């Protein structure tokens, strides 16, 4: 898995401890759309495993997740300011 992390995202992740947790989330409406959710704190009830470490940052995905993306893009959304992750350049998982 190749990491593509913007400098603002790296700074924000470091400000919050240096760890990023990324997981797929299925929508309850609109068919079978699966998007990505990212946070600097692990959500309750989900076991994670570390999949990458780069420039003092650690990246985690759910332990049960078998297929990793070719690329994980990480950037900052400005309003509200938060870290966003993109799987192979997309905000959803196919």
Image: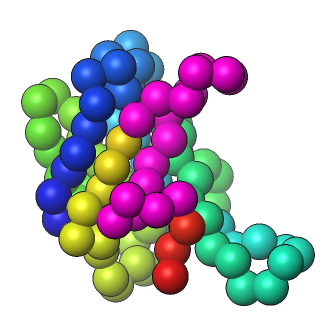
Q: Position of residue 88 (x, y in %)?
A: 34, 65
- The image quarter in which residue 35 lies: bottom right
Residue placed furthest toward the right? 29
| Quadrant of res 33 | bottom right
The answer to whether any part of residue 67 appears in the image is yes
Q: Is residue 92 left or right of residue 73?
A: right
Q: Which residues are magenta?
A: 75-91
Picture coordinates of residue 90 (x, y %)?
A: 46, 62
In terms of depth relative to the viewer, which is nearer, 40 or 29? 29
Depth check, front residue: 66 or 74: 74
Q: The N terminus is located in which quarter?
A: bottom left
Residue at image x 42%, y 79%? 64
- In the rendered image, which quarter is residue 65 located in? bottom left
Residue 51, given in percent of the width and then of the height, sits at: 23, 60
Give the residue at x 36% y 42%.
Answer: 74
- Residue 73 appears at what percent x and percent y? 33, 49
Residue 48 seen: no
Left or right? Give the position of 70 relative to 28: left
């Amino acid at each position: 898995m190749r990491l593509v992390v913007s400098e603002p995202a790296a700074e924000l992740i470091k400000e919050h401890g240096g760890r990023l947790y990324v997981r797929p989330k299925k929508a309850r409406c609109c068919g079978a759309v699966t998007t990505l959710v990212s946070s600097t704190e692990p959500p309750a009830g989900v076991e994670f495993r570390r999949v990458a470490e780069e420039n003092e940052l650690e990246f985690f995905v759910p332990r049960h997740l078998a297929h990793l993306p070719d690329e994980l893009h990480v950037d900052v959304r400005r309003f509200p300011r938060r870290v966003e992750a993109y799987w192979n350049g997309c905000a959803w998982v196919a």
